[in-house]
Image (tube, rainbow, N blue to C red):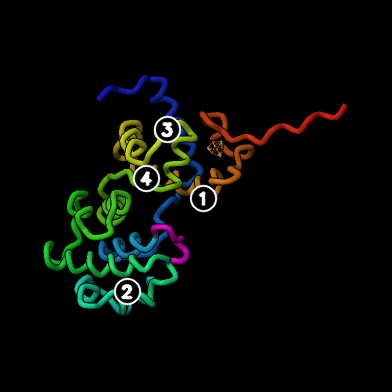
């Protein structure tokens, strides 16, 4: 693996310093208290919002408090609890993943990428989020915000999430991966929005490789 240039390393360091100052309290916005809850909440959050997931999970965790309880239920019973988070398949995947955890992993949510990704409905992003949030294992989960913001800033130059993940892991010190993931999400939600990013008031504008600046108004004569 080639080392990044000193200029690139300095650019990355400056961006990370600004993000750290902007979002000192960046943390997961989903609510969970253990690896099982982290997995369920993260699976529900795909194509939904954290706010919506946080509305449904208290009832889910009350009525299915352990992975064994979830494994014993059926997708049909779970569906009414989670329907507002989209896709019927989420209920099926959560129940099947729970059964898999009970049967293949002795009831313990796996703490490595390969085993997590072997669970029904668990992709790379979900697995990385669980590693980072449930086990505090450094992981670079690339969701839509991380992908967009990191490529606009120039932390990555990639057309897909896998390449973005690889480039971010190379550019950012390993002990900052989990924090950087949250910083980029916070910045994407609050400032570097998908539509109409607030570039003109963005603290990272001087460091950003691809700002989306609104055209200047023509001056009146
Ligand atoms: S300057 Fe614009 S594109 Fe760059 S990080 Fe800020 S909001 Fe995003």
The mark found on residue 38 in the picture is: none
Q: Quadrant of the C terminus?
A: top right
Q: Quadrant of the N terminus?
A: top left
Q: CA distance from mark 4 to mark 3?
A: 13 Å
Q: CA distance from mark 3 to mark 1?
A: 18 Å
Task: Say which of 82 and 150 sits in front.
Answer: 82
Disc 1 element: helix
Q: Residue sitting at 46 percent across and 66 percent down?
A: 52
> Residue 141's spot in the image, x, y percent?
34, 46
Q: Residue furthest right?
A: 221
Task: Tell me the residue that label 1 is attached to.
Answer: 189
Q: Nearer the viewer, mark 4 or mark 1?
A: 4
Task: Tell me the residue that label 3 is attached to.
Answer: 155
Region rendered in magenta: 46-54
Q: CA distance from mark 2 to mark 1?
A: 27 Å
Compare marks 4 and 2 and give the one earlier in the sequence.
Answer: 2
> Residue 199's spot in the image, x, y percent?
60, 38
> Residue 69's spot in the image, x, y percent?
22, 76
Ligand number 1: quarter of image: top right
> Can you say whether 58 is above or below 118 in the image?
below
Disc 3 element: loop
Task: Tell me the residue that label 2 is attached to.
Answer: 61
Q: CA distance from mark 4 to mark 1?
A: 14 Å
Q: Residue sitting at 39 percent across and 33 percent down?
A: 158
Q: Residue sitting at 59 percent across and 35 percent down?
A: 212
Disc 4 element: loop
């Amino acid at each position: 693996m080639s080392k990044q240039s000193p200029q690139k390393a300095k650019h990355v360091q400056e961006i990370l310093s600004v993000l750290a100052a902007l979002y000192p309290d960046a943390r997961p916005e989903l609510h969970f208290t253990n690896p099982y809850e982290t997995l369920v909440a993260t699976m529900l959050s795909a194509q939904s919002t954290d706010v919506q997931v946080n509305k449904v999970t208290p009832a889910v965790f009350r009525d299915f408090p352990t992975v064994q309880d979830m494994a014993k239920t059926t997708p049909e019973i779970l569906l009414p609890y989670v329907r507002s988070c989209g896709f019927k398949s989420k209920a099926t995947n959560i129940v099947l993943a729970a059964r898999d955890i009970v049967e293949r992993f002795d009831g313990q949510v796996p703490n490595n990428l390969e085993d997590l990704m072997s669970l029904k409905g668990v992709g790379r992003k979900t697995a990385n989020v669980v590693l980072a949030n449930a086990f505090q294992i450094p992981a670079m989960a690339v969701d839509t915000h991380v992908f967009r913001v990191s490529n606009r800033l120039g932390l990555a130059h990639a057309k897909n999430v896998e390449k973005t993940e690889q480039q971010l892991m190379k550019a950012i010190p390993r002990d900052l991966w989990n924090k950087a993931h949250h910083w980029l999400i916070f910045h994407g939600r609050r400032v570097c929005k998908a539509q109409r990013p607030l570039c003109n008031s963005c603290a990272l504008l001087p460091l950003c490789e691809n700002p989306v600046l609104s055209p200047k108004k023509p001056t009146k004569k």
